[in-house]
Amino acid sequence: MEKIKLDNSTRVFPMPMVVVGAVVEGRNNYLAVAWVCWVNANPPMIGVALGKGHHTNKGIREHKEFGISIPSVDLIKAVDYVGLVSGAKADKSKVFESFQGQLKYAPMIRNSPLTLECKVVTKVDLPSNEFFIGEIVGVYTEERYLTDGKPDIKKIRPFMLTMPDSRYREVGEIIGNAWNIGKDFQT
Amino acid sequence: MEKIKLDNSTRVFPMPMVVVGAVVEGRNNYLAVAWVCWVNANPPMIGVALGKGHHTNKGIREHKEFGISIPSVDLIKAVDYVGLVSGAKADKSKVFESFQGQLKYAPMIRNSPLTLECKVVTKVDLPSNEFFIGEIVGVYTEERYLTDGKPDIKKIRPFMLTMPDSRYREVGEIIGNAWNIGKDFQT
């Protein structure tokens, strides 16, 4: 079939929804983010790309710390809200109950099933975004989200953003085992 | 409920599966990657974090170009295979039928419903990984993956990796409209 060119900004793969927490002007602030991925295995590091205009960036630049909360579907309305409204205009410190780990400026959401606290290692300055790379120095959960001592995605129920339809979606059914289903593949 | 600390390398959110294409030692090579995200809005840029030991990195370093193919669930076995087997040991150029856009060293998978060709803008050197940031200079699809001229995720059928269960999963059901469902949220 013939290939068609689309606009270079077309984004299709499913993106994980997280909430980035920072302390901005003395106040906890939260921002919904889907541009996030792990970037280093050892030590574990994560990266988040935030538009330069965001209020949150100021706090991360100042304190070089941030929190990442992986929300469950139960928190969907609050997560969407902190993506809609800027911390420059509204106090978002009360949207979630916050908690701290060992870092002072990496607020995390108490009701979020899995959260990370991160120390900024480096920041990549791009034309419209800043990509903050953080070393993960603490990961927090609760007993009720574990099965046999491991985080259980069916209990955590994270969700995703898909584009260009702008929908939040659940994690779907299992279709195969990674590092396994391709073992018998013949070229 | 009381918080429990987990290992800092705990990874839970759903990660999109893509295949990174590069030309290594004159041959097309493909690698399955889940550590990928958009990093800049304008111009559109994407980032991929590859373990330093990967064969693919050599080609990206040399030519400063790479392709990103977003595979559908139909390609799951081949995608898993190119994540299991190194291009240093096996010729992975025939696993997929390749095609080129305007770049010479950014091979893409012809049977992949959506593909991107990227020019490296910068590379972030991290302890165990390299994070390649590429400007997207071409996006390709076919008529059969579009609805009303836009990519349709139900036709494209991308899939994800979840950890720590090491499963590939489909994109799940819609649970809300982004930038909308939180409009009536009250703090």
Image (cartoon, coloured by chain):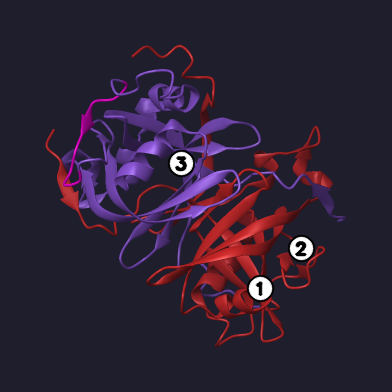
Chain colours: A purple, B red
Task: Tell me: B84 left or right of A157.
Answer: right
The Cα atoms of the two marked residues, 2 and 1, are separated by 14 Å
Q: Position of residue A6 (x, y in %)?
A: 79, 46
Q: Amino acid at mark 2?
A: Arg
SS for dot 3: strand
Q: In this orientation, does residue A180 appear?
A: no
Which sits in the foreground, B79 or B133?
B133
Q: Chain of mark 3?
A: A
Q: Are marks 3 and 1 in contact (CB under 8 Å)?
A: no
B22 w.r.t. A122: above or below? below
Q: Amino acid at mark 3?
A: Val
A180 w.r.t. A86: above or below? below
Whether the magenta-drawn stretch holds residue B58 is answered as no
Q: Which mark is residue B22?
A: 1
Q: Are marks 2 and 3 in contact (CB under 8 Å)?
A: no
Q: Residue at x 54, y 66 (%)?
A: B123
Query: Which residue in the structure is indicated by mark 3?
Result: A171
Q: Residues within 10 Å of mark 1 (few under 14, many from 20)?
A: many
Q: In this orientation, does residue A125 appear?
A: yes
Q: Residue at x 55, y 80 (%)?
A: B55
Q: Which mark is residue B110?
A: 2
Q: Where is the N terminus of chain A found, in terms of image quarters? A: bottom right
On the same chain, marks 2 and 3? The answer is no
